[in-house]
Amino acid sequence: MGLKEDRRLSRNPRGLPGQTEIAEGLALSLSSVLSSQTGHSLIMWFYLVTLVSLYHLLRWYRERKVVSHLQDKYVFITGCDSGFGNLLARQLDRRGMRVLAACLTEEGAEQLRSKTSDRLETVILDVTKTESIVAATQWVKKRVGDKGLWGLVNNAGVVQPFAYLEWYRPEDYMPIFQVNLIGVTQVTLSMLFLVKKARGRIVNVSSVLGRVALFGGFYSSSKYGIEAFSDVLRREIKDFGVKVSIIEPGSFSTRMTDPELSIERTKKAWDAAPEHVKESYGQQFFDNFCSTTKRELMRCSTNLSLVTDCMEHALTSAHPRTRYLAGWDARFIFLPLSYLPTSLVDYLFAIFRGKPAQAA
Ligand SMILES: NC(=O)c1ccc[n+]([C@@H]2O[C@H](COP(=O)([O-])OP(=O)(O)OC[C@H]3O[C@@H](n4cnc5c(N)ncnc54)[C@H](OP(=O)(O)O)[C@@H]3O)[C@@H](O)[C@H]2O)c1
């Protein structure tokens, strides 16, 4: 039997459409709706991609503009003995800027001077000591004179030991707040009048852990503090022409993240923890924590310039960003995590962490 006859037979006696015709009609209208929907969503995606590309192109073009007279601009950087601070000092020196590098030790200062031009000057600064900050401020004031201080980079920081909150003693976690948070606020407030004079920049080094509090509780708390301090400062100081940027690096291989040193410090904290705390977590849990931490630290990026390029941009671009994420893990792990619901992040964390010996 042919298709036409099939259709004819499917009509009911009163000439109304049969089931097959209804189904065909529905399929036809559905496919036309679908194809028009596909067409609409394609157009929507086209507009979206074009708009996002245009936004990035315009932003790139705007941010390319560099401030003038870099050679006359003074930048003060804390924590220049090693890591990001040390690399940034050398980078800005090569660019012809006047770098005032603060080191914690004379040895660190000497090493830095041996690798840079005569333009770069060093001073010893311990950001946990008020008298050291006052002396450094006077030292900077003398050098910058009427020009003021163009850039203040609060880079000095400490992280160790990597541990669970309960394993810390006050003498382990107090320095984390003293260096990373109190030190930054004191240095900033002490030198702010010089930065205001130059209508300059303040660059505060936070961390991806200032965005998502996953581990490293006290470190993370100190970096959340930096984020809040920087946000308030930026809003208050804007009218004076001062711009505040926050740098949020992912994991990078520096002295701070040295795997051997870190595990040594973690073991010290564990050994000193009260017996009841150690029993509740158990030796197996601690050993797993150490091996996971060591493995993660060994994966840290060695390309520190990803971070110092952000710092340099914040100091030299006519239009610096408020926040800079540095490193692939910062962009593709921590940024998305920061937008997930807290309950989901808690769940993911619980999967990776494993259970302590006396877990409920
Ligand atoms: N490495 C990372 O993965 C990572 C990720 C996110 C954020 N950060 C942040 O980046 C910044 C720089 O760290 P880094 O990775 O370059 O580590 P780093 O190599 O250990 O540099 C930290 C610097 O701070 C100095 N410092 C320590 N205590 C100080 C104090 N009381 N006063 C003045 N200076 C002091 C250190 O001096 P000594 O070396 O002499 O102790 C060192 O020069 C820190 O704020 C850190 O929190 C690092």
Image (tube, helix red, strand yellow):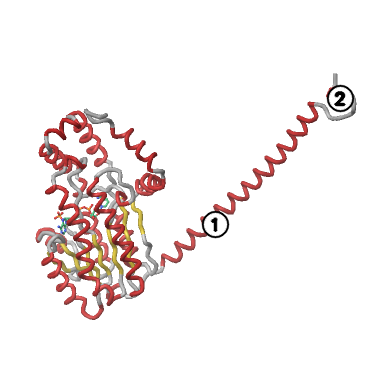
Q: Dividing the image into four quarters, tell me where ligand 1 lies.
A: bottom left
* Whether the residue under disc 1 has CB within 8 Å of ligand 1: no
Helix, strand or loop for disc 1? helix
Q: Nearer the viewer, residue 109 or 94?
A: 109
Q: Is residue 16 left or right of residue 297?
A: right
Q: Could you tell which of marks 1 and 2 lies nearer the N-terminus? A: 2
Q: Is residue 213 left or right of residue 187?
A: right
Which quadrant of the rendered structure holds the N terminus?
top right
Q: Is residue 264 above or below residue 84?
A: above
Classify 10 Å Cα crowding around label 1: few (below 14), some (14-19), many (20 and above).
few
Which quadrant of the rendered structure holds the C terminus?
top left
Name the residue that disc number 2 marks: 12
- Label placed on residue 51: 1
Q: Where is residue 352 drawn, in percent x and y?
A: 31, 34
Q: Nearer the viewer, residue 21 or 260?
A: 21
Q: Is residue 16 above or below residue 173?
A: above
* Whether the residue under disc 2 has CB within 8 Å of ligand 1: no
Which residue is at a point 71% across and 37% down the rendered structure image?
31
